[in-house]
Amino acid sequence: MNKNYVLLATLAVALMFSPLARAQSWSTIGSTCQPGTDSIGLYTYGNGGTTFQFEPGDTGTISARCQVNNPLDKGQPTWTTLGAGYVDPDGEGGDYEVQVRLLEASRSTGNSAIIATYDSDQHAVSGPTFKTAPINHVFNFAKFAYFVTIVVRRDDDNANPGVFYASLN
């Protein structure tokens, strides 16, 4: 067998078992998340069914929870960013807001804690966009369950904020 083929085969096997070769991202569209009971009758799925947003004419706050699964068969993901694809029609203004939060829940007590938050009112972008917030956390799926919450607020019905995508990378 040619030495080059042996070298390439060895390199391919090494890459398969490398942490860099394993999938380490998680993502979901807004409409796959479970709306809270406080959001019943206030939300709809726009953009062809992907965006979690308000029903026409409704105002207030709507929220949904998204289950996060470990994409690795063994070990822990090394996610460093929480991302959100969203639209906040007034950017840093106060009439509309989108928050995406990563939380952990203890498997033994059920107590939860916020790990990271992205808030659209921290950015001046008023059209559809994707932004991230840093995560500084060591994930432990043996002791905790993880979930993302989507919170959308609007004070008037002149425009419609919403979340179409959330991710961990």
Image (tube, rainbow, N blue to C red):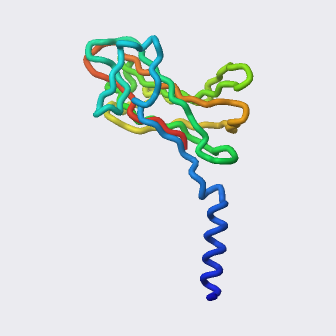
Rendered view: 104 above or below 109: below
Residue at x-position 38% and y-position 33%:
164
User: As drawn, is 160 to the left or to the right of 2?
Assistant: left
Quadrant in the rendering for residue 130: top left
Residue at x-position 34% and y-position 24%:
161
The C terminus sits in image quarter:
top right
Q: Residue furthest bottom?
A: 2
The foreground one among 153 and 4 is 4
The N terminus sits in image quarter:
bottom right
Quadrant in the rendering for residue 45: top left
Residue at x-position 35% and y-position 30%:
51
Rendered view: 39 above or below 162: above
Q: Position of residue 38 (x, y in %)?
A: 45, 11
Q: Position of residue 99 (x, y in %)?
A: 47, 25
Residue at x-position 58% and y-position 48%:
24
Q: Position of residue 166 (x, y in %)?
A: 46, 35
User: As drawn, is 137 to the left or to the right of 67?
Assistant: right
Q: Position of residue 12 (x, y in %)?
A: 61, 70
User: As drawn, is 27 to the left or to the right of 4?
Assistant: left
